[in-house]
Image: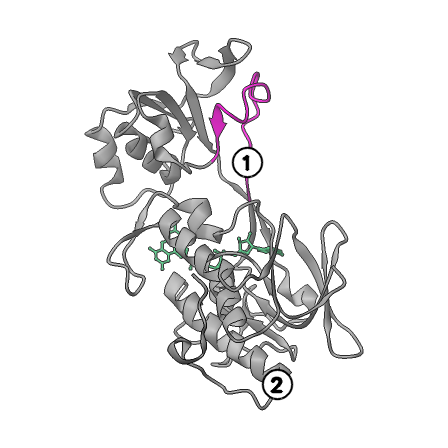
Amino acid sequence: MSELYDVTIIGGGTTGLYTAFYSGMRDLKTKVIEYQPDLGGKVSFFYPEKKIYDVGGFPGVLGDDLVADVKEQALSVQPTIVMGEKIKALEKQEDGTFVLTSHSGEKHFSKTVIVASGLGTYDLRPLDVEGSHYYGGQHIHYTIQNLMQYTGQKAVVISENRVGLDWALALENVASEVHLINRGAEFKAVYGNDLEKLEHSNVHVHMEARVEKLEGTETALERIILDNGEQIQTDHLLVYEGLQIDKSLYDQWGLVTEKGRIPVGTDMATSLEGVFVAGDAAVYPSKTMLIASGFNEAMAAVNSAKSFIDPKAKSQVYSTVIYKHVE
Ligand SMILES: Cc1cc2nc3c(=O)[nH]c(=O)nc-3n(C[C@H](O)[C@H](O)[C@H](O)COP(=O)(O)OP(=O)(O)OC[C@H]3O[C@@H](n4cnc5c(N)ncnc54)[C@H](O)[C@@H]3O)c2cc1C
C-alpha cells in the first residue's frame, strides 16, 4: 500500500472506471479505490437491469452490460483496484504528494487524486424480521443482479418505493408468481404510468402490510407471514427498504464545496492543487449528472493530472495514435 501512484481515483462507478482506463492509456500508474464490493456505482446499484438510451454510441444498453464494458476497458490498462475501502481522509504532504486514509486505517499514496465518488456511499437497509438472518444470502436479495435466476420461481418483493414496483414488473416476465408488499398506503417516487402498469399486471399487490416472519425448512425459505396473518409461499424475497446514505464530506478533505459537490472549471481542477474531480461529484454551470458527462470529465481530469505531473506532456492525445491495445 505504501507504493506511490501517479493517479489515485476515489470511486469505481462508471466515471471512476473510465477515468482508470484513460489514466492508464496516458501511461499513468493508476489505482482505483471503491467502497462497495462491486464496481459500477449508481448504475450497478440502482438500475443494473434497466436499459439506458442516452450514452453516445449505444442505442440502448442494459446497465449491467454498460458496466461490464467500462470495466473491461478499465481492466485492459491493468490499474490496481482496491475494493471495500471507504476513503475518509485526504491530506497533502510536505513533498506535495497525497496520502489517502480509508475507514480501516489503510493508507494510499499518490502524486495526484481524481475524485469520482459521486455524492457519497450507499448502503441498503437490511430486512430485520424473525428469520431474516437465517434465510439471508441465497433467499433474500437486495438488488436484481440476474433476472433470469428467478425463472419459474415464486418471488415476493418488499418495498414502498418505485424501485420495488419496477422489480415486481420485471420479475413478472420470468417468475411464476410475484407478490409486492408495501407497508404504506401508496408507492413513493412513482412517475409516468408506473401505477397503471402495475394495475394491468399479474403482480399481487398487498398494501399496508408488513412482513412479520420468514418460515421454511433448515435449508430453504418457504413462506412469509404478514402482520394480518396471511401466508405467502415463496422461493425468494427481494427487499428494497431505502438507503442509508453516507454523504461525502469533501470540505473535510480541504476542498471548496458547493452544496456538497465540488465546483470546477473546464480543467476539472479543485481548489487543492493536484486534486481533480469527475462525474456526479463535480459541479459547474450547465452541469448534467449523466454517465456521458462523467466520461467527458474523466478525460479532462486525467489530462490535467498528466500535465500536473509532467508539464511538458501533450494536453490531449488520440487513442488511435498512441494506444497499443492488448487483446
Ligand atoms: C435511478 C437513476 C436513473 C438514472 N438514469 C440515467 C440515465 O438514463 N442516463 C444517464 O446518463 N444517467 C442516469 N443516471 C445518472 C447516472 O447514474 C450518474 O450520473 C452516474 O452513475 C454517475 O457516475 P459516477 O461514477 O460519477 O458516480 P457514482 O455512480 O455515484 O459512483 C461513485 C462511486 O464512488 C464510491 N464512493 C463514494 N465515496 C467513496 C469513498 N469515500 N471511498 C471509496 N469509494 C467511494 C461509491 O460507492 C460509488 O461506487 C441515473 C441515476 C439514477 C439514480
> Which amino acid is tagged 2?
Asp
Q: Is the residue 115 above or below the residue 170 in the image?
A: below
Q: Is the residue 116 above or below the residue 93 in the image?
A: above
- State the quadrant of the N terminus: bottom right
Residue sitting nearer the eye, 50 or 263: 50
Is 126 situated left or right of 73 in this image? right
Is 321 situated left or right of 26 in this image? left
Dot 1 crowding, Cα within 10 Å, few <14, some 14–19, many 20+: some
> Which amino acid is tagged 1?
Arg
Q: Is the residue 264 above or below the residue 278 in the image?
A: below
* Type of secondary structure dominating the magenta stretch: loop
Rendered residue at 21%/35% (across/down): 196
Viewer-side label of 2, 1 = 2
Dot 2 crowding, Cα within 10 Å, few <14, some 14–19, many 20+: few
Q: Earlier in the sequence, mark 2 or mark 1?
A: 1
Residue stretch rendered in magenta on the structure:
123-142
- Residue 32 can be seen, yes or no: yes
Residue 95 x/y as whole percent: 78, 79
- Residue 290 can be seen, yes or no: no
Rendered residue at 45%/56% (across/down): 72
The picture quadrant where one finds residue 4 is bottom right
User: Is residue 130 in the magenta section?
Assistant: yes
Residue 167, which numbered label?
none
Residue 68 x/y as whole percent: 42, 51
Residue 310, which numbered label?
2
